[in-house]
Image (cartoon, rainbow, N blue to C red):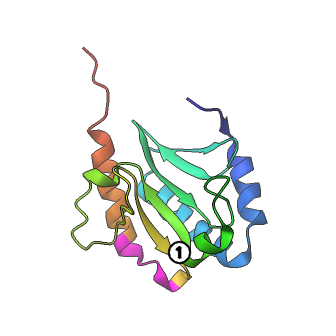
Amino acid sequence: MPPFASATDIDNMIAALPRDERVLVTRLRTLVTECLPKATEKAYKDQAMPFYTRNRLICFIWPPSVAWEANTHYEKQKTKGVALGFNQGNLMSNDNGILLAEGRKQVYMVYFKKLADIDDNQIRALLFEAALVDEQFRKTSP
């Protein structure tokens, strides 16, 4: 497993974001910690972005100004907005079609460009479902 950075690193990274991204990341982070109280917030050292884990990785928040990979162009990501990714998105119901696979088999995303795009109830429902999916991976003692 890759090394993780501290919550302080996440706080510092969020503080360094452009204001529009910082507002979205902060709101999403609040919703995630509210809905997934048993999850642990960790950040991959190289990216200092919040990932939430319990039994497995559950979800993550990723602003466009933090490059996904070396060849990703900021402007392309900026058009999508801040991502809330669900690591087991393929196992979620996605009845309303809000989760986007974008050619991926497992990780599904939702994007937000402005605070008004975040429907708190809808995001809470997704997070609660993601927690239920994560429980399927709980290790049981023999």
Question: Measuring 73% from the left and 67% from the top, which residue is drawn there?
Answer: 17
Quarter of image, res 79:
bottom right
The residue that appears at 59% across and 52% down in the rendered structure is: 50
Does residue 37 appear left or right of residue 16 in this picture? left
Question: Whole-percent x and y of residue 107?
Answer: 40, 53
Q: In this orientation, which residue lies closer to the viewer: 44 or 32?
A: 44
Magenta stretch in the rendered image: 116-122
Q: Residue at x 47, y 82 (%)?
A: 117
- Relative placement, left or right, of 27 versus 36 is right
Q: Position of residue 80 (x, y in %)?
A: 53, 74
Local secondary structure at mark 1: helix
Say which residue label 1 marks: 80
Confirm whether the magenta stretch covers residue 20.
no
Corner quadrant of residue 68: bottom right
* Figure label count: 1
Quadrant housing the C terminus = top left
Q: Is residue 120 magenta?
A: yes
> Looking at the picture, does residue 108 appear above or below residue 95?
above
By secondary structure, the bulk of the magenta-drawn segment is best described as: helix
Q: Identify the residue at image location x=22%, y=60%.
A: 93
Q: Quadrant of the N terminus?
A: top right
Farthest residue toward the front? 71
Residue 94 at x, y = what percent? 25, 65
Decide if residue 77 is on the left or right side of residue 107. right
Q: Amino acid at mark 1?
A: Lys
Residue placed farthest to the bottom in the image? 116
**Label 1: how many Cα within 10 Å (few below 14, some 14–19, many 20+):** some
Left or right for 141, reference 9: left
